[in-house]
Image (cartoon, grey):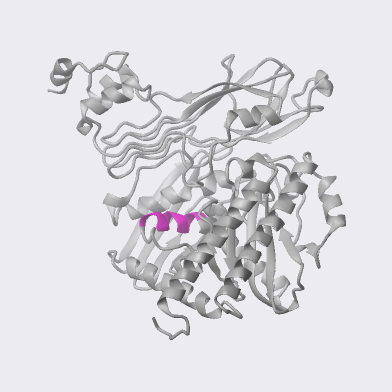
């Protein structure tokens, strides 16, 4: 260590582990008290503790990289407006400003100071995705952020322990699900309070008046450990690009990664300009997911905090889709932003090819389903149950070095699929089908993860609407090292009509929406995959007998029985 500390090594390790436990309990408190299914069931949240310099000391494992890493920058904006010396015990602050928070209006970030003996000693912050913020609703159709919902600047949610009732009333009259949104704001404050209590207990146990020493140890050691791993890599510049669907035209994501003694710089110059629709990305969200892509390959065992994040520097020119300025529409920024780890890992593949997976479906398939008066374009909707629900589901991940990809699994966001039973309980929808999508995983020595198929209808038979925010419908996830691409996604009606993969669209009475989610790319030559593994894939519905023959040169019956003689002849 570059400095000496009063705490001994055992105390340092215990305190560090205790902070990690505290923020995990903070996150679990948020899940237990949240109202929205996106938080309670999917885990679309973040939680962390910060020192008085605005440095993130620890983050909960539970949560998404976009929330956590963006929140690491967000807390500094709170401190700019409310310096710790001006904070009052019992005050709690919040915002959902996309450029001061985590990238779009649907994420509320709440910051709470921790007081000990009348002095601020730390800050707890948490973020969660709420079901609705008014406006056009969660989706990519907006032209400006003003259309996307209510924007709350950094301000007090609570003052000396009293709720800001005027703020709550303003929010309630602007959203479609007022009880859920209000409840989620209280859950954010409650989870910070849980973290504060546990931190004060720990400080009392170790007779600490402040966190200065342990904070410096955590940040310095994390920085030095991350930098040491970077310095083991070959130095140089490496470029990679990816084309994705976009809203009405394709988008090119272009990255140049430079590895040097001082760290890793990722520059997105050359990336497509901003879109006229709400798929633009504020730069903090870009930095969050790009740095996560690096951390997946380098330093993945080092705890995530301001120290370990510091050696990874991410820039994007103003005006490109990855650095959209106010008042651009940004509601569906995740559709583009969650592609960035794959772009970054395309650069990393040139450096450490044995550590990097193939491309995956990447961005979530999380449509907003809406019904009730004025929704769906049919007059009888005035008598149908009004609802707004955001369901979280995923395609397949790319094949991994030495392993197949994960099926129906969210990467890089890490959120969970929301259970069918929960969605059917809180909204008048019925899920007719939910199963793995055969042949969607790219062929390879290691197969890409498969997507899934879901069919959703309205239980009351009324017209309704779906707000789509999907990608990989025109440009599939690419394989690596001779691996084949994953299957492309498709949004359609059961009757056969194809729907756009982005934007709000009406669903006529009695119709069923079908989501065919994309799969991940394969890794390695498909002919090097053992026939026995291919037969297992066929038997379990991951690969069809036809695809086994065409892509793998393996002959398997429809029930998954391997024909070894025919396979040997076909592969000869």
Q: On the rendered structure, is 171 left or right of 196? A: right
Q: Residue at x 37, y 64 (%)?
A: 258
User: Per the image, is 469 magenta?
Assistant: no
Residue 556 location in percent, x, y?
26, 17
Q: Which image quadrant is residue 418 in? A: top right
Q: Position of residue 165 (x, y in %)?
A: 86, 56
Above or below: residue 516 compared with residue 175: above
Q: Which of 104 and 299 is in front in this view?
A: 299
- Stretch of the chain drawn in magenta: 289-297
Judge by depth and name the residue closer to the eye, 321 or 32: 32
On screen, residue 552 versus residue 145, left or right, reads left
Residue 293 magenta-highlighted:
yes
Which quarter of the image is occupied by the N terminus? Answer: bottom left
Rendered location of residue 387, percent (x, y)? 75, 31
Q: Residue at x 22, y 21 (%)?
A: 554
Point 45% across, 61% down: residue = 267
Q: Where is residue 241 in the image (x, y as percent from the top left)?
A: 41, 49
- Prevalent SS, magenta region: helix
In the rendered image, which quarter contains the C terminus? top left
**Is 493 in front, or is 225?**
225
- Image vertical order of residue 91 relative to residue 283, above or below: below
**Residue 284 seen from this side:** no
């Amino acid at each position: 260590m570059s400095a000496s500390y009063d705490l001994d090594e055992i105390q340092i390790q215990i305190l560090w582990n205790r902070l990690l436990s505290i923020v995990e309990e903070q996150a679990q408190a948020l899940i237990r008290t949240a109202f929205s299914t996106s938080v309670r069931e999917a885990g679309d949240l973040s939680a962390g503790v910060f020192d008085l310099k605005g440095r993130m000391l620890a983050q909960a494992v539970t949560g998404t990289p976009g929330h956590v890493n963006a929140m690491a920058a967000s807390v500094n904006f709170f401190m700019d407006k409310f310096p710790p010396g001006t904070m009052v015990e019992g005050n709690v602050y919040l915002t959902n400003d996309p450029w001061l928070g985590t990238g779009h209006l649907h994420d509320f970030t709440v910051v709470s100071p921790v007081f000990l003996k009348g002095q601020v000693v730390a800050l707890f912050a948490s973020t969660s995705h709420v079901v609705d913020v008014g406006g056009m609703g969660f989706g990519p159709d907006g032209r400006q952020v003003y259309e996307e919902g209510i924007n709350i600047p950094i301000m007090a949610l609570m003052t000396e322990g009293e709720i800001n009732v005027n703020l709550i009333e303003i929010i309630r009259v602007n959203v479609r699900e007022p009880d859920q949104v209000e409840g989620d704001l209280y859950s954010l404050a409650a989870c910070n309070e849980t973290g504060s209590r546990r931190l004060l207990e720990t400080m009392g146990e170790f007779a600490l008046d402040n966190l200065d020493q342990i904070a410096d140890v955590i940040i310095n050691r994390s920085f030095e450990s991350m930098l040491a791993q970077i310095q083991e890599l070959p130095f140089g510049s490496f470029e990679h690009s990816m084309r994705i669907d976009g809203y009405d035209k394709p988008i090119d994501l272009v990255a140049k990664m430079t590895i040097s003694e001082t760290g890793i710089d990722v520059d997105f110059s050359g990336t497509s300009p901003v879109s006229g629709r709400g798929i633009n990305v504020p730069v903090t969200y870009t930095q969050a997911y790009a740095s996560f892509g690096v951390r997946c390959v380098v330093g993945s065992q080092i705890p995530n905090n301001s120290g370990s994040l510091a050696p990874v520097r991410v820039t994007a020119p103003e005006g490109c889709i990855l650095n959209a300025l106010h008042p651009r529409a940004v509601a569906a920024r995740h559709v583009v932003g969650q592609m960035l780890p794959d772009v970054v890992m395309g650069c990393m593949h040139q450096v450490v090819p044995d550590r990097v997976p193939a491309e995956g479906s990447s961005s979530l398939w999380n449509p907003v389903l809406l019904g009730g008066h004025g929704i769906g374009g049919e007059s009888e909707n005035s008598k149908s149950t009004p609802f707004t629900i955001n369901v979280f589901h995923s395609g397949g991940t790319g094949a991994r070095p030495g392993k197949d990809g994960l099926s129906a699994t969210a990467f890089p966001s890490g959120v969970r699929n929301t259970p069918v039973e929960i969605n059917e309980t809180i909204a008048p929808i019925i899920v007719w089908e939910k199963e793995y999508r055969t042949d969607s995983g790219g062929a390879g020595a290691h197969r890409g993860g498969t997507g899934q198929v879901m069919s959703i209808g309205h239980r009351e038979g009324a017209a309704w609407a779906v707000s789509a925010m999907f990608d990989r419908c025109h440009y599939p996830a690419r394989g690596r090292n001779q691996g084949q691409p994953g299957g492309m996604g498709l949004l359609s009606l059961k009757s056969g009509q194809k729907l756009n993969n982005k934007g709000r669209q009406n669903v006529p009475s009695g119709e069923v929406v079908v989501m065919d989610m994309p799969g991940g790319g394969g890794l390695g030559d498909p002919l090097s995959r053992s026939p026995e593994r291919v037969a297992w894939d066929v038997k379990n519905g991951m690969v069809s007998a036809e695809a086994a023959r065409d892509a793998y040169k393996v002959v398997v019956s429809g029930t998954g029985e391997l024909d070894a003689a025919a396979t040997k002849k076909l592969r000869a």
